[in-house]
Image: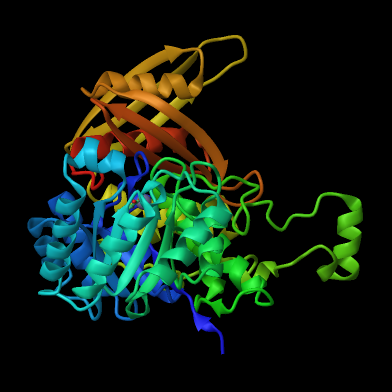
């Protein structure tokens, strides 16, 4: 029997630390439900002390998830740990994940503490966490650049007082696979009570090595990997869950462990995270990219048609490609719509939200005769965010002609009052954004603008992502429509609404 490899998903915490990826409570619950369906073992739902919004989101995830353990991050401080414990009270199974930095550079320049003080604080934190749960994870932050003797000392001390998982973070993505694996092996061998804890890897992708480093850790005895859907995360991201899980599953001839992940939900999880956060998946991304299973060269196609194993190591259907993708049409009723949404992990908190989403579905079905799962996800993301938005798009008329300037005439509802504006510039999208800016008193910089198609064909929904910066705060906005200029307006307005409600939140590692 091979060992169990624990999958710890931190999309809702480390993933949320990506610029502009911050999520609402409802969005976190939606993602958590898909993670539960995938049989993720541990869901890190947030950093409870970061903001009251994050606290409420962890609470909501804890109350809505039955099968996965729910975890909150906490610095090694009493107030953080108690806040995490409070947020997790409703969970069937909970874990507190506490951390303190252990590298010389972090201890000296960030914490201004001596190594002895750091060890004492770590011990105190783990003991404090035990007032709330027996399931305690400890991370020596920046372990990837920490002195190994010191790591052995602090790890032994925290296991002694009850830490059950020891997570080794390569916080700045500095490690190289054979070296990271050797560190894990050496820690397990050298720490006298290492058999009383599970060792875990948490790798960042600054050198593009997060998955490789995690795999090396698993081969060296780690039995938990921390990862995120689509590899989302701080800077270059974290270990991608889908890549790690599929590598271990595909190469069972090499690994003596396997995860319990139901891989058939991988693609829908990837799409959901991408549509909620506005982080597009690159086409050549392994497993979930649009080209991951597309065979271009004639010789490959020929081989695949004769015998798929000639060029395919994973069956596309196994990870959710092509499965049930054609779902509904214009004659589908409200109940069929609701049931299909439930199958996609989407529950409606209110009848109003169900009705708004169903109305958008009917409108879309009039324009586009085949409706796919991805279309449904995009519709709900939009309906869910509109519920709380103070700026709404009422109508947009755009005039475009070769060689002429473009004009956009827009009507917005701002706090339920209709206002309108016209702008003329050289491009249709630019004119639309200028017209919106003239009606809204927010100073923003557009940092990113991208358009992609949600499904195939010229009648597909176009999804627009924008990244806006205002007073140092960054948000991502998304909008989908069969008309990409309207999708652009929706995305821009979505971003502006986020800026209006965004509140300050503490960053765990600063
Ligand atoms: O990268 C890191 O060090 C972290 C810790 C909080 C585990 O995210
Ligand atoms: Zn991290």
The quadrant of the picture occupied by the N terminus is bottom right
Give the residue at the far bottom of this rendering.
Answer: 1
Given residues 97 and 90, the one toward you in this image is 97
Given residues 479 and 183, the one toward you in this image is 183
Horizontal relation, residue 253 to residue 8: left or right: right
The quadrant of the picture occupied by the C terminus is top left
Residue lying at 39% horizontally and 25% vertically, measured from the top left: 446
**Residue 86 at what x, y percent from top left?**
11, 67
> In which quadrant of the rendered view does residue 288 lie?
bottom right
Residue lying at 44% horizontally and 71% vertically, measured from the top left: 189
Q: How is the image coloured?
A: rainbow
Q: How many marks?
A: 0
327 vs 300: above or below: below
**Residue 227 at what x, y percent from top left?**
44, 60
Residue 12 seen in the current view: no
**Residue 351 at what x, y percent from top left?**
26, 66
> In which quadrant of the rendered view does residue 69 lie?
bottom left
Given residues 436 and 464, the one toward you in this image is 464
Residue 141 seen in the current view: yes
**Residue 322 at what x, y percent from top left?**
65, 66
Residue lying at 35% horizontally and 20% vertically, measured from the top left: 435
416 vs 441: above or below: below
> In which quadrant of the rendered view does residue 167 lie?
bottom left
386 vs 334: above or below: above
Horizontal relation, residue 155 to residue 423: left or right: left
């Amino acid at each position: 029997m091979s060992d169990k490899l624990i999958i710890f998903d931190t999309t809702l915490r480390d993933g949320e630390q990506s610029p502009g990826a911050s999520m609402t409570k409802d969005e976190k619950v939606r993602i958590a439900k898909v993670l539960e369906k995938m049989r993720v073992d541990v869901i890190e739902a947030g950093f409870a002390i970061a903001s009251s919004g994050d606290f409420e989101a962890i609470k909501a995830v804890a109350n809505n998830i039955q099968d996965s353990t729910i975890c909150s991050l906490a610095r090694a401080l009493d107030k953080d740990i108690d806040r995490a414990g409070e947020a997790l009270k409703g969970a069937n199974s909970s874990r507190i994940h506490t951390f303190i930095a252990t590298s010389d550079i972090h201890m000296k320049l960030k914490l201004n503490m001596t190594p002895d003080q750091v060890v004492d604080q770590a011990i105190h934190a783990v003991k404090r966490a035990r007032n709330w749960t027996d399931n305690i994870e400890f991370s020596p932050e920046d372990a990837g650049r920490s002195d190994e003797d010191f790591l052995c000392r602090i790890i032994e001390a925290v296991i002694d007082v009850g830490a059950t998982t020891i997570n080794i973070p390569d916080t700045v993505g500095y490690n190289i696979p054979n070296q990271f694996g050797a560190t894990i092996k050496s820690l397990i061998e050298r720490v006298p009570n290492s058999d009383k804890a599970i060792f875990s890897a948490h790798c960042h992708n600054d050198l593009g090595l997060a998955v490789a480093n995690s795999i090396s850790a698993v081969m060296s005895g780690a039995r938990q990997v921390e990862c995120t859907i689509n590899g989302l995360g701080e800077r270059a991201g974290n270990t991608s869950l889908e890549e790690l899980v599929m590598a271990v599953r595909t190469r069972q001839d090499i690994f003596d462990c396997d995860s319990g992940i139901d891989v058939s939900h991988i693609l829908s999880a990837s799409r959901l995270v991408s549509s909620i956060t506005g982080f597009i998946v690159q086409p050549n991304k392994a497993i979930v990219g649009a080209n991951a299973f597309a065979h271009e060269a004639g010789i490959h196609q020929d081989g695949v048609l004769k015998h798929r194993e000639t060029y395919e190591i994973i069956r596309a259907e196994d990870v959710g490609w092509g499965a049930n993708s054609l779902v509904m049409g214009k004659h589908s009723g409200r109940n069929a719509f609701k049931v299909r949404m439930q199958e996609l992990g989407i529950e409606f908190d209110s009848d109003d939200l169900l009705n708004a989403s169903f109305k958008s579905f009917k409108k879309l079905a009039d324009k586009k005769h085949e409706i796919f799962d991805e279309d449904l996800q995009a519709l709900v993301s939009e309906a869910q965010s509109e519920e709380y938005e103070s700026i709404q798009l009422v109508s947009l008329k755009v005039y475009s002609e070769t060689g002429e300037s473009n004009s956009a005439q827009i009507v917005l509802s701002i706090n339920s009052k209709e206002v309108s504006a016209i702008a003329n510039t050289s491009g249709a999208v630019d004119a639309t954004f200028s017209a919106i800016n003239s009606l809204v008193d927010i100073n923003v910089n557009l940092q990113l603008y991208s358009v992609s198609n949600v499904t195939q064909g010229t009648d597909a929904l176009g999804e627009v992502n924008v990244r806006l910066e205002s007073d140092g705060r960054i948000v991502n906005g998304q909008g989908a429509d069969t008309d990409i200029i309207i999708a652009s307006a929706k995305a821009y307005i979505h971003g502006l609404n986020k800026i209006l409600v965004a509140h300050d939140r503490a960053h765990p590692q600063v």
